[in-house]
């Protein structure tokens, strides 16, 4: 994915083949062009990607003044969905227990080494299919900076045959149950997949390094742990991810009190 001025370029592997899409917002509308075998699928999926199917019916903003203000100031906020599992699943696994910068570098390297060039006018690469993730040798995971627990989880998940069952699942709770049956996938990774792939308005990434602190600070002025975050979000059960999005949109963040984490690099060990 790449931003160029006001155009978002995205290269993905769709159910109909590899494709590239360019998205631009103009006068309140989203305009899209696409290339490759997956072009028609990508164009048809744009409304879902932009949150057209997101449903906030019954969402009560009056329970907290910050949420009420954020909802009023961001009336167009929507939770989009990609409807694509492989990218969300593998990228979320790569993000386990490392900084975002480390995960992005690993994702980029593995795509360059094992993906393929995307169609269209830009030099973009598409991530491998799930079947290909299964065949990546251990030394390439290591060379990309991915530690063994994450590489094993990615290979196991790619071989799990989850896709059809996840898309057929009745709700987010069933998707979480299916995902967490895979060794190496916990509640954090399951929630990230539910959010990115399915636009789940209730998914919460418990176990995140920062999230509980940010939610607690925004809603109470003090840090909380995961149990505290669960209690704070309970009044919005069914719409908890929407509350988190509104907290981020509000601009209220906990002041940083310590140096940033220095990433460790295990590749020369």
Image (tube, helix red, strand yellow):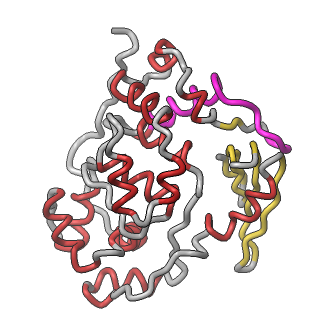
Q: Position of residue 127 (x, y in %)?
A: 63, 36
Q: Is residue 258 above or below residue 255?
A: above
Quarter residue 43 falls in: bottom right
Q: Residue at x 50, y 61 (%)?
A: 198
Quarter residue 34 falls in: bottom right
Q: How many marks?
A: 0
Q: Position of residue 146 (x, y in %)?
A: 42, 25
Q: Is residue 161 above or below residue 153?
A: below
Examine the residues drawn in magenta and state their main secondary structure: helix
- Residue 251 visible within the image: no
Q: Is residue 182 above or below residue 269?
A: below
Along the viewing direction, whichever of 89 and 161 lies nearer the viewer: 161
Q: Residue at x 46, y 36 (%)?
A: 160
Q: Residue at x 33, y 26 (%)?
A: 149
Along the viewing direction, whichever of 167 and 76 lies nearer the viewer: 167
Q: Residue at x 50, y 29 (%)?
A: 106
Is residue 210 magenta-colored? no
Is residue 106 magenta-colored? yes
Q: Is residue 7 left or right of residue 86?
A: right
Along the viewing direction, whichever of 85 and 6 lies nearer the viewer: 85
Could you tell me which quadrant the C terminus lies in? top left
Q: Is residue 123 left or right of residue 143?
A: right
Q: Is residue 201 left or right of residue 222?
A: right
The magenta-colored residue range is: 101-122
Q: Position of residue 67 (x, y in %)?
A: 33, 81
């Amino acid at each position: 994915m790449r931003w160029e001025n006001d155009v978002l370029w995205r290269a993905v592997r769709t159910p109909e083949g590899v494709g590239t899409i360019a998205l631009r917002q103009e006068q309140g509308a989203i305009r899209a062009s696409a290339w490759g075998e997956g072009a028609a699928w990508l164009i048809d999926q744009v409304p879902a990607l932009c949150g057209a199917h997101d449903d906030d019916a019954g969402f009560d903003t009056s329970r907290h003044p910050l949420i009420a203000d954020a909802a009023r100031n961001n009336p167009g906020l929507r939770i989009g969905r990609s409807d694509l599992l492989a990218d969300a699943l593998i990228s979320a696994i790569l993000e386990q227990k490392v900084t975002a910068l480390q995960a992005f570098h690993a994702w980029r390297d593995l795509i360059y080494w094992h993906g393929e060039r995307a169609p269209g006018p830009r030099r973009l690469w598409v991530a491998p299919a799930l079947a290909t993730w299964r065949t990546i040798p251990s030394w390439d995971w290591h060379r990309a900076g991915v530690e063994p627990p994450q590489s094993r989880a990615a290979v196991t998940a790619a071989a799990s045959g989850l896709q059809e069952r996840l898309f057929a699942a009745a709700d987010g709770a069933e998707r979480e149950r299916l995902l967490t049956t895979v060794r190496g996938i916990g509640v954090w990774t399951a929630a990230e997949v539910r959010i990115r792939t399915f636009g789940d308005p209730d998914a919460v990434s418990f176990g995140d390094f920062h999230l509980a602190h940010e939610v607690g600070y925004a809603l109470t002025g003090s840090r909380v742990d995961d149990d505290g975050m669960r209690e704070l979000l309970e009044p919005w059960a069914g719409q908890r991810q929407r509350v988190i999005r509104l907290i981020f949109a509000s601009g209220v963040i906990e002041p940083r009190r310590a140096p940033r984490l220095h990433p460790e690099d295990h590749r020369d060990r």
